[in-house]
Image (cartoon, rainbow, N blue to C red):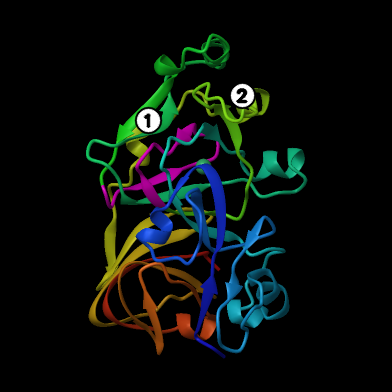
């Protein structure tokens, strides 16, 4: 069994995207509106495909459906996670996601979306939109109805390397100049609450106020509590960032040789700085890969690089 399967990303072009994903991460993708690089995705909207090796050209969903042994025979009707890099040249709209239960009923059986952000780069004094200040559902409704956005939305200051966990029901938005790596459930369900009244091609983008009101958590958890502060080393070179019911996310720092075990069926890995090897496979900043069941037993890396890895609990 191959221990590493490199993945070719899917790119999404958006009105708020830019050139950073090509110029900073080296992706061979044209355009001045590259918003997202879906590095590890089996979502029907945009899939990654195997790059080289035995499975060259296979879509990740095909690998999941036809070669479940690569994933340690993990259960589930679809590959559960999606790892993407988002480059916001402009503010994204203010949005909220449903949980599995709501999405299952109202969005055709889709998963809900719990997500976590690792801040790859941001301007000094960057603030992200997280949470809100309404105390009751009635107050939330009237603040949205009256357009009292400045009063309503919560903000939190972030720096490079910060980690933020966004539970379903939490209002959030990435702001201009911020670049993040997002680990999320494999879902593309987003309810747009406010788009700063921006006009594009002569009209405003569609909002989803009713569904947003259905799913927004009231009162909002404190935005500062969503910035992860208790990251801790779990192995030499490996720092656990988030451990929740849908995924675990860790940061790996390689300087020379490093090996560690993950007692799980498979591991998603993305290189965010530097270059090196994962087993015998050359990787560099921007590389995304699947470490298969056989590799996860004892992951061997070398070089000078940083990675974000994620996996699900068995
Ligand atoms: Zn989101």
Return the disc, 1 or 2, that comes first in the chain's sequence.
2
Residue at image position (75%, 48%) is 109
| Camera-side residue of 233 and 103 | 103
Q: Along the line of sight, which residue is nearer the eye, 14 or 241?
A: 14
> Of helix, strand and loop, which mostly describes the magenta segment?
loop
| SS category of the residue bearing label 1 | loop
| Residue 311 forms part of the magenta stretch | no
As drawn, the label of residue 222 is 1
Circle 2 crowding by C-alpha within 10 Å: few under 14, some 14–19, many from 20? some
Q: For the residue with label 2, is its CB less than 8 Å from the closest atom of ligand 1?
A: no
Residue ID for mark 2:
213
Q: Residue at x 54, y 71 (%)?
A: 8
Number of numbered discs visible in the structure rendering? 2
Q: What x and y, as percent, mark residue 144?
A: 54, 15
Please state the horizontal and vertical placement of residue 266, each as a whole percent of the image: 52, 74
Of badges 1 and 2, the one in the foreground is 2
Check residue 171 for magenta coloring.
Answer: yes
**Which stretch appears magenta?**
160-180
Question: Measured along the vertical axis of the image, is residue 176 above or below residue 199?
Answer: below
4, above or below 219, in the image: below
Q: Is residue 33 left or right of residue 204?
A: left
Vertical placement of 50 versus 250: above or below?
below
Residue 155 at x, y percent in the picture: 35, 29
Quadrant position of the C terminus in the picture: bottom right
Mark 1 vs 2: CB contact within 8 A? no
């Amino acid at each position: 069994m191959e221990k590493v399967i490199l993945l070719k990303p899917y790119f999404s072009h958006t009105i708020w995207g830019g050139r950073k994903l090509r110029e900073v991460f080296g992706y061979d993708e044209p355009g001045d509106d590259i918003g997202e690089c879906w590095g590890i995705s089996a979502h029907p909207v945009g899939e990654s495909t195997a790059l080289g090796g035995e499975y060259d050209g296979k879509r990740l969903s095909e690998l999941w459906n036809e070669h479940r042994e690569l994933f340690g025979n993990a259960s589930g009707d679809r590959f559960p996670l999606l790892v993407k890099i988002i480059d916001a040249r402009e503010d994204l709209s203010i949005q909220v996601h449903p949980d599995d239960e709501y999405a299952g009923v109202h969005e055709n059986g889709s998963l809900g979306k719990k997500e976590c952000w690792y801040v790859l780069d941001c301007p000094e004094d960057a603030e992200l939109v997280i949470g809100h200040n309404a105390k009751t559902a009635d107050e939330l409704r009237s603040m949205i109805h009256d357009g009292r956005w400045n009063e309503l939305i919560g903000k939190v200051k972030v720096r490079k390397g910060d980690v933020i966990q966004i539970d379903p029901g939490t209002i959030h938005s990435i702001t201009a100049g911020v670049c993040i790596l997002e680990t999320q459930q494999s879902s593309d369900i987003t309810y747009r609450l406010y788009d700063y009244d921006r006009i594009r091609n002569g009209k405003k983008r569609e909002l989803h106020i009713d569904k947003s009101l259905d799913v927004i958590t009231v009162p909002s958890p404190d935005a500062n509590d969503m910035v992860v502060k208790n990251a801790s080393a779990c192995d030499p070179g490996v720092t656990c960032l988030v451990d929740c019911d849908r995924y675990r996310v860790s940061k790996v720092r390689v300087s020379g040789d490093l090996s560690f075990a993950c007692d799980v069926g498979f591991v998603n890995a993305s290189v965010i700085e530097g270059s090196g090897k994962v087993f015998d496979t050359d990787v560099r900043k921007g590389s995304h890969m699947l470490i298969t069941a056989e590799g996860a037993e004892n992951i061997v890396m070398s070089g000078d690089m940083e990675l974000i890895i994620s996996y699900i609990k068995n």
